[in-house]
Image: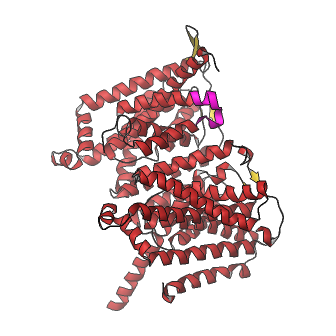
Amino acid sequence: MYSPAIIAEACINGLMTGAVYALIALGLTLVYGVLHIINFAHGALLTAAMFAVWSVHVAFGLDPYLAIPLLTPVFFAVGYAVQRFVIGPASHGDDSNILLVTLGLAIVIENALLAGFRSDTRTLNTEYGFQVVEIGPLLLSQPRLIGFGAAVLVTVVLWLLLARTDTGKAIRAVAKEKLGASLVGIDVAHVYAVTFGLGCACLAVAACLLMPTFYVNPRIGGAFVLVAFTIVVLGGMGSIPGALVGGLFIGVVESLCGLYLGDSLGQIGIFLIFILVLLVRPTGLFGAKA
Amino acid sequence: MRARDLLPIALAIGALALVPLAVSANTVLNFLVFTLVIGLAAQGWNLLAGYGGQFSFGHAAFFGTGAYAIAILQARFGVNAWAGFAIAIAAGALVGWIIGYLSFRSGLRGSYFALVTLAFAEVLRILANASAVTGGAAGLLVRLDVRPENFQFASRAAFFWIALALVGLVLVLTRAIERSRFGAQLVAVRENESAAKALGIDTLRVKLKAITLSAAITAAAGAFYTQYFLYIDATIAYGTWISVEALLAPIVGGLGTAFGPLVGALALHGLGELTKGVAGSVPGIDLVVFGALLIVTVAFAPDGILGLLRRLLGKARRQRAEA
């Protein structure tokens, strides 16, 4: 048995990782909620964002946190263009086509990164990468604490954007009733692209928060995307609070499974939850009844 | 099932069977054997997705089960390779039935079915990577003992002919299913599941039968893979690469057609080799082409290469009729 202090630390570490997971899942759930598609390119786009963070750091010495205001709009634009000019026209509005097109995109992005950067694993060296903050008996990693705060902040901002702005209103209208929205003059293709852009912007922020403590290689997105799928399914497809709570929960589960089962088996807990939720309650904990 | 159905299959397989007589270069035969293994796995996927409309993103679960079953039976229990091959196919079918039973009974379809199959394959990969009986991360070697009764041959041509025979067998099976009552029911499920149910089709039974057969075929590809390379590990057996390969080939070749998977596998891997020849040894470059091809196919040629050919032939015939 582990002492309570170790278990508490594992839980808190899990919560901090979970917040970044939640941010990744947020983009996925937003796209699902509005476009009703599962974006298989999400992981590959995250990998691309992480390489972007690494590249601007190596080329211009830009700090990962300072890269957030630069990369977030860039990735919003990338996401907007990808939906508007690739996924939208290529899939003719058919669900299984969208699935396949995003899968094709994932393959292209991942392997283009492999061709460009080779399969080496890269890390960033920052002065604060290993700094810790002491809170009572617990030692917490400073960059992960920042990640936690920023992830929660982004979730709140996104929620406000959807709840309070006109764009948010249009997005919610399209999510509820596509035909009705277009009848009252909303440009559905534009809203789709904006939503996809927001999803990618979330990934850019997540990448900036991950890079100080994490590594990147062309295959890294796959590991995150399955976790993100689990969170989205658990929290309810399309639910933003669901993504946040699901992300935190999955972070803790992963951390505790890693503690008790070791690293190689640790991830299995996540997938078992994933399968169980899909089989027993595919609408998730916060999702509306289908 | 008539002679007219069998003739094109016999011609295609017969023509391919002559290749080793003309070419003896190992690189060419290696390429062909590998392509046929992919083609076989893809034939399995096509049966479930092309005819039944159930898009699996986790056919690695079946490929890997076949691959590991034959390896474990030989390495740990000293079972004969041919008997192991049969058991491996049965094991794959069983895993297919279990995954199908769990997911279809819960009513999962579309994206949800794709996700749950992906998760099952990942669970199996993690288990195979961590457990002792599969050799963990180090993988499993099959003892080299080159004798036909061990499913090991000195010549690559022998492997080629066996793979070709398996592909041919599945071609005939697919044609027979197309012409059967079960095939018609499967297509009805693909086109409109609620309507099929309303007509009194036991859709759960039909889908279960399809996934079991589909898994058995893909498991055969996995077991053959093990015998060809005599080595297997978790990333090969249960990796996402094979799930992707198994769905790429039929989509590019022609979804829901008997020849689609074979045509697609040959076209994709031919193109892959070509790209590697042109671009040099840049890793991943062939896969960039595959992914782009998937998008282009979905966007412009939803019936794949075979659909394009049919359209071109139809146009030519019409022009001749007008002239």
> B297 or B45: which is nearer to us?
B45
Which percent across, then down, holds residue A262?
Answer: 65, 32
Q: How many marks?
A: 0
Q: Can residue A46 be seen in this view?
A: no
At 74% from the left and 75% from the top, the residue drawn is B157
Residue at the outermost right position: B145
As drawn, the residue found furthest toward the top would be A136
Image x and y of residue A286, in percent: 35, 34
Q: Can residue B94 be seen in this view?
A: yes
Against B84, residue B127 (above or below) is above
Residue depicted at x 31% and y 43%: A34
Q: In this view, does A175 lie to the left or right of B253?
A: left
Magenta part mainly helix, strand or loop?
Answer: helix
Residue B221 is drawn in which quadrant?
bottom right
Which of these two is toward me, B171 or B264? B171
Q: Is residue B147 left or right of residue A69?
A: right
**Range covered by the magenta-colored residues:** A256-267
Q: In which quadrant is the C terminus of chain B drawn?
A: bottom left
Question: Is-magenta flag for residue A259?
Answer: yes
User: What is the image's colouring?
Assistant: secondary structure
**Looking at the image, which residue sits at the far left?**
A184
Q: In this view, does A84 lie to the left or right of A106?
A: left
Left or right of residue B12: residue A84: left
Where is residue B45? Give x, y as percent: 52, 63
Identified at 69% across, 76% down, the residue is B161
The quadrant in which residue A150 appears is top left
Point out residue B259 in the picture as x, y percentages from the top left corner: 52, 74
Query: Is residue B307 shown above or below B92?
Result: below
Residue B202's place in the image compared with A135, above or below, is: below
Residue B275 image-quadrant placement: bottom right
